[in-house]
Image: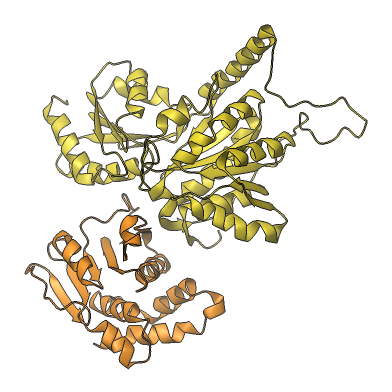
Chain colours: A yellow, B orange
Amino acid sequence: MADKVLMKGNEAIAEAAIVAGCRHYFGYPITPQTEIAAYMAKRMPKIGGCFLQAESEIAAINMVYGVASTGKRVMTSSSSPGISLKGEGLSYLAGADLPALVVNVQRGGPGLGGIQPSQSDYFQATKAGGHGDFRMIVLAPASVQEMADLTVKGFELADKYRMTSMILADGTMGQMMEPVSLDFEVAPAAEKPWATTGTKMEREHNIVNSLFLVPEELEKSNFERYERYKYIEENECMWEEYLMEDADICIAAFGIAARVSKNAIVEARKQGIKVGLIRPITLWPFPTKAFAAAADKVSQFISVELSMGQMIEDVRLASGCKVPVTLCNRAGGMIPSPEQVLDAIIEAAKGGAK
Amino acid sequence: MATKQFLFSGFGGQGILFSGKFMAYKGLIDGKQVSWLPSYGPEMRGGTASCSVIVSDEPVGSPIVSKPDVLIAMNLPSLDKYESTVAKGGMIFLDSSLIERKVERDDVSVFYIPATRLAGENGMPTLANMIIVGKVLKELSDFAPESVDAALAKVISAKRADMADINRKAMQIGAAN
């Protein structure tokens, strides 16, 4: 194995994208993800790739649409307010069934908000990236290594299912450095017979479009797309379980919230409280089966989030409301401390955990 | 060492992030699990910088250091802000050329290093940070020359490789203080 190097999460995403064969990056600077654009600006010209700082986030996502139409691996990145601007483009990518990778290194909101870490774009990423019926594959890294691994995975899934993969990280994940290995096996890119690469007068024109004025045709495209989504929900869920074998209390947390929760779990276990963690790695498709199975064993879920409580709704749905689901959170750029999570665990244990 | 949590703090420009990165790389070279997390918010723009470094035998959970085992304070606002957060029995290293007051806690070990003055006297005015790092490594009995050299090679870009010698010298001055 190659030597591990220390990299910022943002840099790991950029380098992993290059390793995955991405040669087109379009973006617009915004804290706390600017290192992705800076890294691409430095590297792309040296490897025959294209780095372009667009005039706006909206321009960048439409440039992504253009390159995606040709079948090339392409990405953009931004942070929360910038992702909102990309919403229209995300919907068009879905309507045209184009593969792309979009990175959101979240900061506190709403509005211009702040620049500190947040997870308050969960709803936007998993349920409402833009108008119309569509989904994105949403990947939630919890380490710098996963920032790299899930970038590669994101490109592969996007190609496989002809849709957008989104990396939903946060300011901490983007800014922190950890050892990372970029020694990947990257699967060869899938054939893309639909790509607009020139007919050479040898085949029919390929048309990439999201406009369907005949409602019967538009309905058909929606139904077909949702058949694909159903297959993804059954086959592509990823999650990590930590100390769940004997757990009475289950923490649900992703990204940085899961890292903080692990500290609290170790302390709670020292006090004899049987608590574990389910960490969704795919936020869509949500690992419903894992939470449904846990709901038969535990007496309470605690959703730990850097938001006012967004994933908690999916935890409730997945667990069928069989046991209480409580929230332990900070918002606006603040991060729950391990002590706050530990207090929530102790409170849950008092409240009748087995 | 099971887990050591470091908090490096001072003014922007004192090499706070650099010295933290050195410590993280040294841990990596010594086979430890490590994380490094900088402050990047408005406090940084106001002139103070800090970074959390964790070096551990176990996988690192939260990368945020809220109760440091080792605090490096290179200016007064940093000492004021973080003195009370240091874990009981922890260590505080401060630049006594820039911080006139003494540490009030009596349940921690304190090391007063006139780092900025020493750096000036030794013709290395930008290396007060590494003088303190040298002292930290000595007090942690962790000043292994091979891993120090290997970590310096990682944090100093190839173009400026000639800077390794003076960084090493700065750490030796700190260790001897």
Q: Is residue B126 above or below residue A64?
A: below
Q: Quadrant of residue A71?
A: top right
Residue drawn where x is 63% and y is 10% of the image: A219
Residue drawn where x is 55% and y is 48% of the image: A28
The answer to whether residue A273 of the structure is visible from this angle is no
Q: Quadrant of residue A293?
A: top left
Residue drawn where x is 64% and y is 50% of the image: A52
Q: Residue furthest top?
A: A216
User: Percent position (x, y) of residue A21?
Assistant: 67, 48
User: Percent position (x, y) of residue B64?
Assistant: 29, 53
User: Percent position (x, y) of residue A155?
Assistant: 61, 39
Nearest the viewer among B8 and B41 is: B41
Name the quarter where the C terminus of chain A is drawn.
top left
User: Percent position (x, y) of residue A12?
Assistant: 52, 53
Q: Is residue A284 above or below residue A148?
A: above
Residue drawn where x is 19% and y is 62% of the image: B82
Q: Quadrant of residue A69?
A: top right
Q: Is residue B41 above or below residue A333?
A: below
Left/right of residue A306 with respect to residue A51 in the rendered view: left
Left/right of residue A257 with respect to residue A14 in the rendered view: left
Nearest the viewer among A89 and B150 is: A89
Q: Residue furthest front?
A: A55
The answer to whether residue B10 of the structure is visible from this angle is yes
